[in-house]
Every structure is written in C-alpha cells, then in structure tokens.
Image: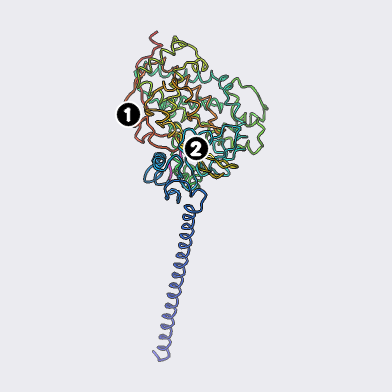
Amino acid sequence: MGAQDFTGIVRRAVDSERLSGLFEKAMNDKWLTLQNSLLVCFSLYSAYWLVVYIYRVTLHPLAKFPGPVLAGVSFWYEFYYDVWPRRYGYMWKIEELHKKYGPIVRINPIHIHINDPNFIDQIYAPAGREKRNGDPWFSMATESGMMAWSTLQTMDHHQHHLRRGALSRFFSKASVRQLEGLISDKIDRLLQRLAQMHRAGDSVINSTHVIAALTMDIISSYSLGVDMGNLTREEWGRDWSETFPRLGTIRPWGRQFKNLTVMSLSIEPSIVRWFNPTAAAVAEKAKYPMEVIRAHIDKHEKDGATTNMATNNRTIFMEILDSSLPPHEKSVGRLNAEAFLLLGGGTDPTTRNLTVTMYHLLANPKLLQRLLDELKLIMPRPDSPVTVAALEALPFFSACITEGLRMTNAVSTRMPRVSPDKAIVYKDWVIPKGTPVMQSLYLLHMNDDIFPEPMRYNPQRWLDNPSLKSRYLMAFGRGSRQCLGINLANAEMFLTLARVLTRFDLGLYDVIRERDIDVSGDCFNGIVRDDSPGIRVKLLRDNLAEI
C-alpha cells in the first residue's frame, strides 16, 4: 500500500468520524430542542391551569359562596367522590357539605346546591313563570346527536318548550285515559303468564325483570306502536331491562369526559365493546327504534295525517310529524333519539317505583291488608274491572303509591336549572344569572325535618298532612321540565299494583333491603348494590283459581 493510499484511508476515516460527530451533535441538539419544547409547553399548561384555579377561588362570581376550596378549584373533587376511587357517592358528600357549610354550597366550579325544601319552586319555576334552561355540563349535552335531540336533553328553554309541546297532548291525562285498555291488556298478559308459572310449580320470580318487561311493553306499544314482546320472552327481556340502568352509570363518567363518552355512544357498538361494554350495550339498543321510525314516516307520507287517538296507532312519531315543528325537527335522527329516551324513561323509573313499593307492602303485612281491604270496595273479585280514576279515589292506596315514590328515588340526582335572564336570590345570597342551581331529589325525600323517620315506609304521613305532596314530592321533577310521562306512569302503578296484589298472594324471597332496595349510588337514577340479584318474590296462591 502506497503512502498516498494510506493517507486517503486516514482522511476518509477522519471524515467519517467527523460526520458521525456532527450527526450525534445534531441529534443531541434536536433532542434538547424537543425537551425544551415539551418543558415550555408543560410550563405554559401548568401556568394556565394555575391561573384558572386561582381565578376560580378569588375573582370568579361564585368564589364568595360557602364550600370547600378544592370543590371550587376543580371538577376533580367531584370526580373523586363520584367516579374514582369512590363510585356514585357525591350526593352523600354534598349532604355532609351542607351540614358543615349551611343550606347553600358551591359543590364544583360552576354549580350551586341548595338544600332547602322550601326553595323548590324558586329553583324550578312552575311552567309559564320564568325561563329555566338545562345545564349542558351536567347533562353531557351536545349541539347535535342523541345527546341533544331528545326533549330530555334539550337545554334551551324555548326549544324545550317547542319540543315538549309537540308531545304534551300525547301524554296528557285525557290521552292516557283513552288508552287505559292498552295498559290493562298488557297487565292481563302478565297475570296469565304468572298463573301458568304458579300452576307449573315455578313459583319464584324476579319482579325486577318481570315488571320491566311489563313497563317496556306498555311504553313501546303506547309510544312506538310496536309491542316489544318482552312479556312472552323466556328471560322477560332481561337484556333490555338491564340496558337502561347502564345508561345512568355512564353519566358520572360522561360529565368528566364528555367528548369520549359521546363518541363511544355514536360509533359502531362492536368497536366500542372492546373498551367500554356498557356504552356498547346502550349504543346497540339505541338503534332499535330506527326501523320503526322509517316505517312510520313512510306510512305518514302515504296516508297523510290522522287525528284518531283511540288506539296506539297514534304514536309519538305521528305527533311530531303532524306538529308545527320545522322540518329539521322531524328528522329520523331526532325521532330516534326521542324514541329511545322515552323507552328508557318509561321503563326503568316506573319499574323501580313499582317493585320497591310492592316490596314495602309485602314487608309490612298490616299495611298490605289495609290496602287489600280498601281495594275490595271497588274490586270484590281479583278479575273485577277497574279504572285508574276509581283507584286514585282510594285515599290509602294513593298514599301507599306516593310513599313508594318518595322512598324509591328512581331518579335520585340533583337537577340543575339555569336562570338565563335573572339572578336567583336565596336569603342573603344573590346567585348570578346563568349559574346552574339545584336540589337533590334524594336529599329532599330523605329530609327528616319534612319526613320524620325517612327510612320507614309510612303511607299515613300523606293522609295526616295532604299538603306534603304538592309541596315536597319531586319524584317526577318540578316546573316546566317535569317528567312528560307522569300520567302514564301513574296509570301503570295504580293498575298494576291493584291487579297483581289482589290476584296473587305474594311473599318476599331472599330479599335483603340494604342490598336490593335502598339506594346505594346516585348516577341520575338511584341504583342498588352491584351484587343485587333483583327483587325476588314467591307466588304463594292464585286467588282467582281459588274462587
């Protein structure tokens, strides 16, 4: 090898080493730049939230209100008690806060909670008095999609009034009375199947599934014009009856992670099932009304509008399609959202109210006998025809149902209302307009100043003080946003309890009140413990067969 060749090899080696060094230096500089960028971003992010936190407890319009500093600083305070590590328990923490701070408390950065039974109407404003909007944060409301299109999820006062108006005639007391035969027909089917089970020796039933099958068949027939057929299914449509309580359990998570939750409810359920089975089950069931809706729209366009309310052929879809609502309010998507929320609202709360009320009557034989004696005045036989009006006229029976509604707390949560134009004044406190203000239904119903011994089922309290109902019962909400289906729910409760309790002698079967009855979690609806198998009862005797 010549000197020239050797020199070339050395030069190339040196150049290679130099290039390597330059590359390494460039990479180090790039890494340092990336590190610096991340550090700057993190610092700016931290500084931003530090300023937000300081503002929330110093200059924010709600900073002057009583409450823990951490609750005013961040929604993570609520997350701790409602999502993780505790679950669905913030309502009881709110109760503790009231004991410490008084009747008015700031429970998160934007919410004021008032625990005063005598301030209900000022918050919820009876229809026609003042505007009350919903709260988008609490309701996970969006600008479009299922979380915006139903009447329940409509936040704006005027839009809610328009949408509710299109349905109010359908759920009026007169309309429910005209379709009372439909409800009785479904109850007849239930009684026939229970009688068959009793004769076959299959005497233990899960009343949670059984009553859910009944209420869903009623609301689907009444509002959609299609019977779900759960009363004839072997498992009583258990897959459906378990879907709607799941929808409630999504809400505490959804308030903290709205975008993620809304997305999981809107994409393909088979994909969602991999990371959120609960949301997937809800999303899958939410698609059910779509095919029914398309058939109704086709029929409506072909046959034109009808006005006959004598049968359940007159569905909510017809009510909306024939209403004065603008065309975009009659889209398939909005009709689907309305239908699904009505299915849930007509199934889960009514099921809870019926089964829990039945439990308390079976657990108190003297009260049950007093009720049966009163029912005999208008139902001498178990198969005697009876109307809702006749049943509502029975004072003790009405008191039993009212007390059941109070203790069930099928909807237990706080109900935020926003006064968009005027401040709300509570004692010496002026709550700025636009602030969500609320009471919790459960805390109201369990208030021992209004209802002594609140955990005791005592129908007599409503007979001794009839004004309690109009002043303090909030089982169906209050004001312009009161539950649309109150008349239908009342008809179902009166007819079902009267027909079932007079037809069969029932006994409780392995029911543990702390596990199966009492509310142990608040996620919009009051829920029981996860290990509850439901409320089971035993068919002891078919009274009609004995006659």
- Characterize the local packing of mark 1: few (<14), some (14-19) or many (20 or more) Cα atoms within 10 angstroms: few
Alpha carbon distance from label 2 to label 1: 30 Å
| Residue 156 appearing in the image | yes
The residue tagged with tag 2: helix, strand or loop? loop
- Characterize the local packing of mark 2: few (<14), some (14-19) or many (20 or more) Cα atoms within 10 angstroms: many
Q: Which residue is mark 1?
A: 512
- Among the 4 quarters of the image, the one containing residue 307: top right
Q: Which mark is residue 152?
A: none
Looking at the image, which residue sits at the far front?
428
Q: Amino acid at mark 1?
A: Ile
Q: Considering only vertical position in the picture, is 445 above or below 38?
A: above
**First of labels 2, 1 by sequence position:** 2
What type of secondary structure mainly makes up the magenta span? helix
The quarter in which the C terminus is drawn is: top left
Q: x%, y% of residue 494?
A: 47, 20
Q: Which mark is residue 415?
A: 2
Q: Considering only vertical position in the picture, is 304 above or below 84?
A: above
Q: x%, y% of residue 443?
A: 43, 34
Q: Considering only vertical position in the picture, is 47 above or below 12?
A: above
Callout in the foreground (2, 1): 2
Viewer-nearest residue: 101 or 171: 101
Give the magenta part as a residue range.
Answer: 275-286
The residue under the point 45% across, 46% down is 66
| Residue 247 appearing in the image | no
Viewer-nearest residue: 162 or 211: 162
The residue tagged with tag 1: helix, strand or loop? loop
The answer to whether the residue labelled 2 contacts the one labelled 1, judged by CB atoms less than 8 Å apart, is no
Q: Amino acid at mark 2?
A: Met
Viewer-nearest residue: 200 or 455: 455
Q: x%, y% of residue 15?
A: 44, 82
